[in-house]
Image: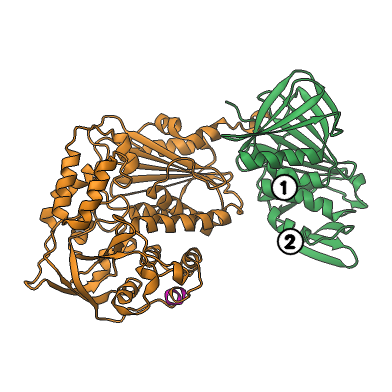
C-alpha cells in the first residue's frame, strides 16, 4: 500500500490525469477482494482498501463521460461566471490543486447551491449540472493564503466569498477532459484542465458580515466560523470561505482542502450547538420525523431524555458501495451526552447531526436522538454529503408523529423501513440502552 | 388560602430538583399538608414532596386547592430569595401569588395552570437494603460517577458498607460509605443486593443534598431505588427511580 501511494503521489505532480487513471487501474486490477463493509465505511474518502483511487468511483467516472456537453473555443478561453465554486484538493498537501468553477449559463448559482437543489433536483439532474461546470485548476502551496491581500490570487479568493455569481474569464493550457469525478463528501466535480491565467471581471459582492470577518486579521478561524453561522450565512458559503483560507489569524491562514473543510465546519458548529442544546429541557413525547430524497430514507426518533445521538446507516444490497452483497450492511456510530464520538468519524454523521441539532436548538429542547438512514438502489451515485445535511434540516418542517411510548414509535418507523425492526434494535447501542431502562409505573 | 414557609431557600432547592424532572407540576394543599407528585416524561422516576402543615409558620387552608405551575418559571423567581427569607404562598383569582419576605417583600404573581395529571399512586415496593447516610457523600459519589459514564451501581453485601459505583465504558469510580468513616448512620440488609440506575436521572435531584443533611437510601436487586430526603425537620421529598436491567 505504501509503495502504491508513493508512486501515485510522484505521478500526480508530474503526469496528467490520464496516466493517473492508468496507474490507478493497474492497482485496482490487483486481485484483492474488498469487503463491502469496508467500502460502506470508507465511501471512497478514506482509502481503507489501500488502493490509490477508489475503484467504485473510477467506474463512475467512465460511465458519465458521455454526459458532459461542454464546448470550448479553439483558443481554450472560457468565459462565464463562477457560482462561486472553489474546490481545494488534498492530494500532495501542502501543495494542492485549486479549482475555480466556471459556467456559462443564465443561472450560474444553480450549479453550486445545495440548499436550492434539495427536494427539487433528481440525481440525474445534479450530475448533469455538475458535469457542465468547468473546473480550471492551478497548483499552489496552502500557505499562499497568508501572503496575499492583493493580486490575482486574492481576487480568486474574494470571488469565492461572493454572495452572487462573479463574471470570470479563464485561459486554459489545454482542453478539459470531459469526465465527472464523484466523491463521498463533495458534489460531483466536472471537467478540469490546467490554467494559464484567470481573470475575475466583476467585483465580487460580499455580505457585510463576511467582509468584516475576512478582514479581521486577529480573529481565530473557529470564532470566525461561529460568527458567520450565527449571522445566518449559509454553511456552504462558510465552508467555501474557510476552504479558501480567508478565515483565521492572518499569519496562520492557509488553504484547507474542501473535504477537510466540510467536516471541520460541521464539527465546529456541532460542538457549539451541543453545548447549548444540553442545557435545554427534554421533550415530553416520542417524536418521529421522516423524509426521503435521492433514494435515501431518513427516520429520526427523538426520545425524551438527555441529549445523545446515534446514527444507523443501513445500506441495502446493490447500492453504490454494497455491490452484489446479499444482506443489508449496517454501520453504527453514536455519542453520549458528552458529545464525544465513540467510533470512526464520517462526514455524513456530522452532516446529519448538524441538521438535527439545529432543529433541537430552534425547539429549545434536548432529546435522545436515534437517526436511521436507509440507502436504497436509487442512490446509484454518491453526490456528496450535502443532501444528508439538508434532509435532516428540512424534515423538521413537517409536523412530527407523536407517540407516548417507545414501542409505538418504533412500530411506526418499522413500517417504513425495508429492514426489520430487529436489525435496528440489534445494531443500536442507545436503543438497547433505553430499552434496558425500566419504567417506574411498573411498580405502581 | 395562605401559607407561610419559614425558609424560602429550602423550597427553592426542592423546586430546583423538581424542575429537572418535569416542566409543569401541581401542588395540592389540604388542611393537613402540601403534596406534590410528579412523573418525569420518560416515566422512569417519580418525585414526591410532602410538607405537613406544622412546618409552616402560618397555614390557613380550609379546603383542598391545587396550584399548578411551570417549574422553570417558579425556580427563576425563587432563586431571587436570600438566606432567612420567608415564602408566602397564596391563591387569588386564578393566580398563584408567591411572596418572598425578607428585609422587604417581593410579590410574584403567576398564572395558576391546570395540569392534566391524574392522581398518582406511590410505588408499592419492598426493598431489601435500607441505609441512612449523610447526604454529602451521596452527592460526591454521583458527581464522580457522572464524570466517567452514564450508570451508577448501588450495592450492599454486608451491614458494614454501602458501595456506590460509577460505571463507564472504560473506567469505574467507587465510593465506599461505612460506619468507620462516619458517613453511614445505619444500614439494614435483608438480602445482599446490587442494582444499576441511570445517572441522567439521579443527578437531577442532587440539589436536594443542599437542604437535607441525611438521606435514606433503599434498593434491591433489579428493583427501584428510593431516596428519601428529610427537609426542615418534618418535610419529606422522596424520589423513586426504576432500575436498568440487563
Q: Is residue A431 above or below residue B223?
A: below
Q: CA distance from mark 1 to mark 2?
A: 18 Å
Residue at the image position 10 percent from the left and 69 percent from the top: A72
Total marks shown come to 2
Q: Position of residue A394 (x, y in %)?
A: 40, 56
Q: Which residue is mark 2?
A: B110
Q: Position of residue B209 (x, y in %)?
A: 79, 44
Q: Which quadrant would residue A73 be assigned to in this image?
A: bottom left
Which class describes the residues within 10 Å of circle 1: few (<14), some (14-19), or many (20+)? Answer: many
Q: Position of residue B2 (x, y in %)?
A: 87, 55
Q: Secondary structure at mark 2?
A: strand
Q: Is residue A263 above or below residue A152?
A: above
Chain identifier of the orange chain: A
Magenta residues, as a range? A209-213
Chain of the residue displaying label 2: B
Query: Of residues B113 and A386, which is closer to you in this image?
Result: A386
Q: Is residue B145 magenta?
A: no
Residue at the image position 33 percent from the left and 57 percent from the top: A93
* Image coloring type: by chain
Magenta segment, prevailing SS (helix, strand or loop): helix
Give residue B18's mark: 1
Judged left or right of residue A122, residue A176 is: left
Residue at the image position 84 percent from the left and 48 percent from the top: B63
Judged left or right of residue A136, residue B132 is: right
Q: Residue lying farthest top?
A: B191
Q: Is residue A429 above or below residue B88?
A: above
Chain identifier of the green chain: B
Q: Which quarter of the rendered picture does the C terminus of chain A lie within? A: top right
Residue at the image position 82 percent from the left and 60 percent from the top: B81
Amino acid at each position: 500500500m505504501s509503495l502504491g501511494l508513493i508512486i501515485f503521489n510522484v505521478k500526480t505532480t508530474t503526469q496528467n490525469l490520464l496516466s493517473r487513471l492508468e496507474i490507478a487501474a493497474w492497482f485496482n486490477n490487483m486481485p484483492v477482494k474488498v469487503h463491502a463493509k469496508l467500502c460502506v465505511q470508507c465511501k471512497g474518502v478514506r482509502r481503507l482498501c489501500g488502493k490509490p483511487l477508489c475503484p467504485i468511483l473510477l467506474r463512475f467516472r467512465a460511465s458519465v463521460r458521455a454526459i458532459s456537453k461542454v464546448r470550448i473555443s479553439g483558443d481554450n478561453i472560457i468565459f462565464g461566471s463562477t457560482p462561486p465554486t472553489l474546490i481545494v484538493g488534498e492530494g500532495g498537501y501542502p501543495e494542492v490543486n485549486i479549482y475555480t468553477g466556471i459556467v456559462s449559463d443564465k443561472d450560474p448559482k444553480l450549479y453550486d447551491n445545495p440548499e436550492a437543489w434539495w427536494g427539487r433536483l433528481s440525481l440525474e439532474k445534479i450530475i448533469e449540472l455538475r458535469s457542465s461546470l468547468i473546473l480550471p485548476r492551478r497548483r499552489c502551496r496552502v500557505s499562499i493564503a497568508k501572503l496575499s491581500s492583493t493580486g490575482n490570487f486574492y481576487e480568486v479568493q474574494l470571488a469565492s466569498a461572493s454572495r452572487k455569481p462573479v463574471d470570470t474569464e479563464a485561459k486554459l493550457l489545454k482542453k478539459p477532459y470531459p469526465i465527472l469525478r464523484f466523491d463521498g463528501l463533495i458534489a460531483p466535480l466536472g471537467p478540469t484542465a490546467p490554467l494559464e491565467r484567470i481573470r475575475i471581471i466583476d467585483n465580487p459582492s460580499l455580505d457585510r458580515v463576511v467582509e468584516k470577518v475576512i478582514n479581521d486579521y486577529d480573529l481565530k478561524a473557529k470564532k470566525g466560523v461561529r460568527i458567520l453561522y450565527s449571522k445566518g450565512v449559509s454553511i456552504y458559503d462558510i465552508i467555501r470561505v474557510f476552504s479558501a483560507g480567508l478565515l483565521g489569524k492572518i499569519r496562520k491562514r492557509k488553504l484547507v482542502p474542501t473535504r477537510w473543510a466540510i467536516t471541520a465546519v460541521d464539527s465546529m458548529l456541532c460542538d457549539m450547538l451541543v453545548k447549548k442544546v444540553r442545557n435545554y429541557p427534554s421533550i415530553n413525547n416520542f417524536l418521529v420525523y421522516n423524509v426521503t430524497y435521492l433514494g435515501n430514507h431518513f427516520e429520526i426518533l427523538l426520545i425524551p431524555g438527555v441529549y445523545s445521538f446515534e446514527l444507523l446507516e443501513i445500506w441495502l444490497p446493490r447500492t453504490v458501495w454494497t455491490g452484489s452483497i446479499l444482506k443489508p450492511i449496517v454501520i453504527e456510530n453514536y455519542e453520549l451526552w458528552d458529545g464525544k464520538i465513540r467510533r470512526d468519524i464520517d462526514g455524513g454523521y456530522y452532516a446529519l447531526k448538524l441538521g438535527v441539532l439545529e432543529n433541537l436548538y430552534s425547539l429549545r429542547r434536548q432529546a435522545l436522538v436515534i437517526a436511521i438512514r436507509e440507502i436504497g438502489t436509487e442512490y446509484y451515485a454518491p453526490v456528496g454529503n450535502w443532501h444528508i445535511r439538508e434532509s435532516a434540516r428540512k424534515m423538521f418542517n413537517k409536523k412530527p408523529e407523536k407517540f407516548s411510548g417507545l414501542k409505538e414509535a418504533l412500530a411506526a418507523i418499522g413500517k417504513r423501513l425495508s429492514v426489520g425492526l430487529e436489525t435496528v434494535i440489534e445494531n443500536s447501542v442507545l436503543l438497547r440502552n433505553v430499552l434496558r431502562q425500566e419504567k417506574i409505573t411498573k411498580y405502581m | 388560602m395562605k401559607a407561610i414557609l419559614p425558609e424560602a431557600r429550602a423550597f427553592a432547592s426542592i423546586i430546583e430538583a423538581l424542575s429537572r424532572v418535569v416542566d409543569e407540576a401541581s401542588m395540592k394543599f389540604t388542611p393537613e399538608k402540601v403534596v406534590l407528585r410528579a412523573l418525569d416524561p420518560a416515566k422512569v422516576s417519580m418525585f414526591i414532596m410532602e410538607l405537613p402543615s406544622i412546618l409552616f409558620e402560618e397555614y390557613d387552608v380550609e379546603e383542598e386547592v391545587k396550584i399548578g405551575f411551570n417549574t422553570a418559571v417558579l425556580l427563576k423567581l425563587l432563586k431571587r430569595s436570600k438566606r432567612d427569607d420567608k415564602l408566602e404562598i397564596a391563591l387569588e383569582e386564578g393566580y398563584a401569588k408567591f411572596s418572598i419576605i425578607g428585609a422587604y417583600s417581593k410579590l410574584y404573581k403567576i398564572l395558576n395552570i391546570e395540569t392534566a395529571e391524574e392522581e398518582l399512586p406511590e410505588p408499592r415496593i419492598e426493598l431489601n437494603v435500607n441505609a441512612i447516610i449523610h447526604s454529602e457523600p451521596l452527592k460526591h459519589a454521583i458527581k464522580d460517577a457522572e464524570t466517567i459514564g452514564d450508570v451508577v451501581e448501588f450495592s450492599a453485601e454486608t451491614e458494614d458498607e454501602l458501595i456506590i459505583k460509577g460505571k463507564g465504558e472504560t473506567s469505574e469510580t467507587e465510593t465506599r460509605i461505612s460506619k468507620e468513616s462516619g458517613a453511614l448512620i445505619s444500614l439494614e440488609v435483608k438480602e445482599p443486593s446490587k442494582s444499576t440506575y441511570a445517572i441522567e436521572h439521579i443527578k437531577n435531584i442532587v440539589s436536594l443534598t443542599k437542604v437535607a443533611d441525611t438521606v435514606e437510601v433503599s434498593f434491591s436487586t433489579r428493583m427501584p431505588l428510593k431516596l428519601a430526603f428529610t427537609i426542615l425537620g418534618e418535610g419529606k421529598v422522596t424520589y423513586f427511580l426504576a432500575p436498568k436491567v440487563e
